[in-house]
Image: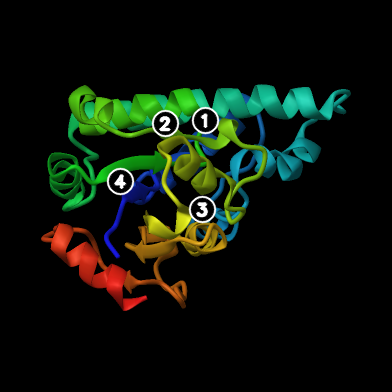
Amino acid sequence: MPIDLVISDLDGTILETEDYHRRAYNVLFRELNLSREWSEADYKARLATMGGAKFDEILPWLSQPVENHVETCRTLYARKTELYVDLVVDALKRGDLAPRPGVKSLFKQLIDSGVGLAVGSACVKWAAERVLQASLGKELVSSLATVCAGDDVKAKKPDPAVYLLVAQRCGVEPRNCFVIEDTRHGMEAAHNAGMRCLVTPSKLAKGDVFQGAAGELESLEGIGIQDLQVFWEKC
């Protein structure tokens, strides 16, 4: 059975950006005059808490009581997202950050061969698109079948919603989709959608157990379409 659609996660998979989320939270803490700072270990422990759900922990730290929990979470999450995008785009411009090895080469092969390529991310849509364009270039991004993001669905990974939405928008059966992820909860989202998954663990996901993955690679460097097919057929 051939692969009809490859779906890639964004943070940690295309770019090693998970730590930029941590840095954005720490900048936000300083803006809020909070004497808090998340270390890499602190953030790794919260990695599976997706989207704005981390603010359920953060709001009680504020000096003033919060009258509207939902609106405050939305406002602070929006600010944190702005900080994250600024940090990532600046790092890309300075050359301190680049797509993970092999990503652009594989993506170009997929597009040139006619195999569908899409992105399914927990990130906010505008932020995902900005980071994708800054890292991969507008031409490659314009060739993606679709980009589905956290604000396109109600439930976050490991819920399969974002991956099922990608498949639906592309008119492809979930069983014919191959997902590339970097975390265990991302892999679980793919499996919960009935999709196979290849894992390239990000720095913060090193040491996690990826039982059931089609394969686990250090990176996508040197990986082509035929290699994907080999991993696909293992499942």
Q: Earlier in the sequence, mark 2 or mark 3?
A: 3
According to the image, label 2 marks what residue? 128
Label 1 SS: loop
Find disc 4 in the rendering and name its residue: 14
Amino acid type at image mark 2 = Ala
Q: Residue at x 30, y 68 (%)?
A: 232
Q: Earlier in the sequence, mark 4 or mark 3?
A: 4
* Label 3, label 1: how far apart the Cα atoms are: 23 Å
Q: Earlier in the sequence, mark 4 or mark 1?
A: 4
Dot 1: within a 10 Å radius of its alpha carbon, few (fewer than 14), some, or many (20 or more) residues? some
Which residue is label 1 attached to?
124
Q: Could you say which disc has been placed on residue 16 in the image?
A: none
- 128 relative position to 215: left or right: right
In this rendering, the answer to whether 99 lies above or below 88 is: below
Q: Position of residue 55 (x, y in %)?
A: 70, 39
Dot 4 alpha-carbon crowd within 10 angstroms: few under 14, some 14 to 19, many 20 or more: many
- Residue type, mark 3 in image: Ser
Q: CA distance from mark 1 to mark 2?
A: 6 Å
Tell us which disc is closer to us: 4 or 3. Answer: 4
For the residue pair 112 and 59, the one nearer the viewer reads as 112
